[in-house]
Amino acid sequence: RNYDRHRRDAVAMEQLTSSRWIMDIYGFCGNSGVFEYADGGDLDDSLFAEDGEPWSGSEKLVVAFQVASGIAAMHNSHKEGVPAMVHTDITPSQFVHVSSAGIYKLNDFNRCRFLTWNKRKNKTCTFHIGNNPGTFRAPEEYNYEGESEKIDVYSMGNIFYSLLTGVYPFENISKSDKVQNLVKKGLRPPFSKSILNSTDPFEQTLLNATLACWVQDPEKRATARSIQKYFEAKLVKLGIPKS
């Protein structure tokens, strides 16, 4: 089982090495691999660090842009607009900071799925995974319905939520099955009134993106590329330099 998981991880990362938003792979054999060194820890460490200064609104939006860029690069790796692979396990810990590049990069593809194409319907085929645990997943995962690249987008919205609020989605609910039932019913983690009524453009942008990622129907849910472009346009408008 683990041989196949690491085979998928290696194939995905080799295909994605050309992207600056994905960790580089240098080689693998069996259950071992050699990758780019992430010396800055993962996004989970940074989000919930007990020491250090809180991120500003602009810093949060820049990190959100990096997250969206990694997922968009993966989904569109073979042809723009035609998703080729799905990560299926998007959480803050899957984004690691590479100091030499100055950005968070997506990694860890051993749960990924490679998508196939339905010639008759002219669209990608859905897939099924037999076990979808935890509290960070999309409603169709918990319903064990056909899945698509949109499950990554939903989970990406959870990362944006944590960036905005400083807590995990449904952090006050200890039992995962209760969270899963809420998500299946279309309920989402709450935002404080200060965030909902905020006039801060960085918070407004993150809030809008989060809600677009959380749409119940995957067909109507935003794409990773559309979120990336939305962030990019807002960053330019708000005067944040590309560097």
Image: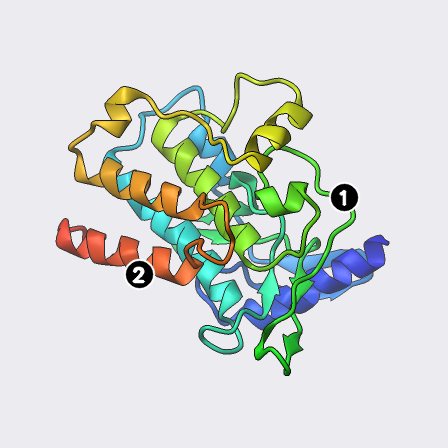
Q: Which of 48 and 115 lies nearest the eye of the viewer?
A: 115
Place of residue 206 in the rendered image (x, y in percent of width and height, measured from the top left): 31, 41
Place of residue 67 in the rendered image (x, y in percent of width and height, measured from the top left): 43, 50
Q: Which of 28 and 222 lies nearest the eye of the viewer?
A: 222
- For mark 2, give the secondary structure: helix
Q: Residue furthest right?
A: 1
Place of residue 74 in the rendered image (x, y in percent of width and height, measured from the top left): 52, 64
Residue 237 vertical placement versus 143 (above, below): below
Q: Quadrant of residue 12?
A: bottom right
Does any portion of residue 26 appear in the rendered image?
no
Name the mark on residue 211.
none
**Left or right of residue 78, residue 177 in this image:** right
Residue 106 vertical placement versus 158 (above, below): below
Specify which label sits upstream in the sequence, 1 or 2.
Answer: 1
* Residue type of the residue flagged with mark 2: Lys
Does any portion of residue 95 appear in the rendered image?
yes
Residue 72 vertical placement versus 49 (above, below): below
Q: Which of 223 and 121 lies nearest the eye of the viewer?
A: 121
Q: Quadrant of residue 24?
A: bottom right
Residue 55 vertical placement versus 226 (above, below): above
Place of residue 41 in the rendered image (x, y in percent of width and height, measured from the top left): 51, 39
What residue is rendered at 71% in x and 47% in y?
144
- For mark 1, give the secondary structure: loop
**Marks 1/2: CA distance?**
33 Å
Residue under numbered circle 2: 229
What residue is rendered at 18% in x and 40% in y?
201
Residue under numbered circle 1: 131
* Residue type of the residue flagged with mark 1: Asn
**Left or right of residue 67, residue 95 in this image:** right
